[in-house]
Amino acid sequence: MTSPSQRVLRATIAVASVALAALTTLTAPGGSLVLALVLVALTPFVVLDPASRLGTLLLAGHAVNWLDSVPVPVETGDWLPVLAAAVLLATIHLAAALSSAFPAAADVPGATVRRWARRSAVVLGLSLPVWLLLVTQSAAATEGDALLTYAALAAVGLLAFGFWQAGTRSGRAAPPTSTTPSPRR
């Protein structure tokens, strides 16, 4: 028997998976309807056991279906389905991961759901600038290799994150200093 919160998480997996298959089929001019139907047929098995490897297969299948079917957007308006697909993929992943974190009969604590929702919102919020950069870059169509530009931006971001982490760790790890001498025995 599954708890009500587990049923909501599993229903979220199902709805997001079917919506992503439909979005891919509707967005792609020559998309694979067969692959979309296979992914929809795989969805109930993931809903029954979100902790199984079938969840990974479902996510990978949706990604392959999208990348194989949908052409790279050229105009600004064509990027909205890309954002929607990314949000749906993240929704499937997060609902399956959270559902897997607790036994099926256990209610997922509200504090845990709120924490996961906040962290998910932060990840999606941080993804928006990358999405906007892609939209802007596709509209500008500048000369040069965009991949090298993105790699350099990612390297600078990772380097900055590494320095920030090192700074916060060194601040916490420093032992308190005392100016009073210790008594000798």
Image (cartoon, grey):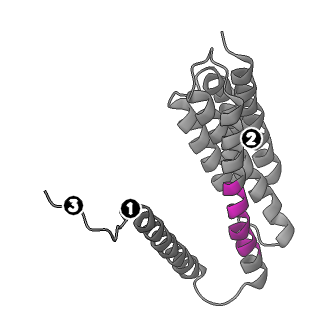
Which of pointers 3 and 2 lies earlier in the amino acid sequence? 2
Q: Residue at x 52, y 76 (%)?
A: 151
Asked whether the beta carbons under mark 3 and mark 2 sit within 8 Å of each other, the answer is no
Q: Secondary structure at mark 2?
A: helix
Start-end of magenta stretch: 122-135
Looking at the rendered structure, which numbered label has been put on residue 183? 3
Task: Indicate the position of residue 23 as horizontal and vertical percent values.
Answer: 80, 46
Looking at the rendered structure, which numbered label has been put on residue 173? 1
Q: Secondary structure at mark 3?
A: loop
Question: The C terminus appears in which quarter of the rendering?
Answer: bottom left
Amino acid carrying label 2: it is Ala
Occupied quadrant, residue 95: top right
Amino acid carrying label 1: it is Ala
Q: Nearer the viewer, residue 27 or 113?
A: 113
Task: Indicate the position of residue 77 as horizontal and vertical percent values.
Answer: 86, 67
Is 38 situated left or right of 101 in this image? right
Placement of 41 over or under 34, stated as above or below? above
Q: Main secondary structure of the magenta part?
A: helix
Q: Nearer the viewer, residue 149 or 111?
A: 111
Q: Residue at x 52, y 27 (%)?
A: 52
Cα distance between the residues tagged 3 and 2: 73 Å
Amino acid carrying label 3: it is Pro
Looking at the rendered structure, which numbered label has been put on residue 21? 2
Cα distance between the residues tagged 1 and 3: 25 Å
Can you tell which of label 1 and label 3 is closer to the viewer? 3
Residue farthest toward the bottom in the current orientation of the protein = 143
Which of pointers 2 and 1 lies earlier in the amino acid sequence? 2
Q: Residue at x 78, y 45 (%)?
A: 25
Is 57 situated left or right of 90 in this image? left
Q: Nearer the viewer, residue 165 or 171?
A: 171
Give the crowd class for mark 3: few <14, some 14-19, many >=20 residues within 10 Å: few
